[in-house]
Image (cartoon, rainbow, N blue to C red):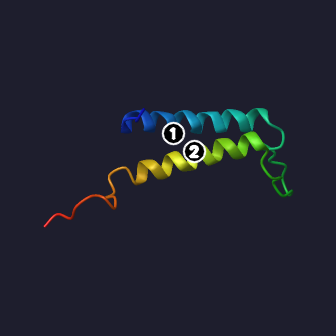
Amino acid sequence: MAQTLAETKAERNDLKRAIARHKGECPQCGSTARGRARPAMCDVGRQLSARHAATVELIKTWFAPGPDQGTLI
């Protein structure tokens, strides 16, 4: 089932909050020790970030013309 733009934006906001909550709970994703390199994110953190990035890209291109759309003259 297709989502509306508002539903997609709500999903993006939910994912943003989920990432922040996950960073607060996960010692690997939330590591902020000063002077140390940040370790690679865990699998859950990577999945959340990938879904968030895909949703953001979908919103950016929501009204972009597709290959099946005719040109306006």
Residue 4 screen position, x and y as percent: 37, 35
Q: CA distance from mark 1 to mark 2?
A: 6 Å
Element marked by disc 1: helix
Q: Residue at x 51, y 39 (%)?
A: 12
Residue 57 screen position, x and y as percent: 48, 52
Amino acid identity at mark 1: Arg
Q: Residue at x 77, y 43 (%)?
A: 43
The circle drawn on residue 12 is 1
Q: Residue at x 40, y 54 (%)?
A: 61
The circle drawn on residue 52 is 2
Instruction: Tell me if mark 1 has few (under 14), some (14-19) or many (20+) residues whose alpha carbon lies within 10 angstroms of its own.
Output: many
Q: Nearer the viewer, residue 1 or 60?
A: 1
Residue 20 screen position, x and y as percent: 66, 37
Disc 1 + disc 2, Cβ < 8 Å = yes
Amino acid identity at mark 2: His
Which of the 4 image quadrants contains residue 52?
top right
Image quarter in which the N terminus is found: top left
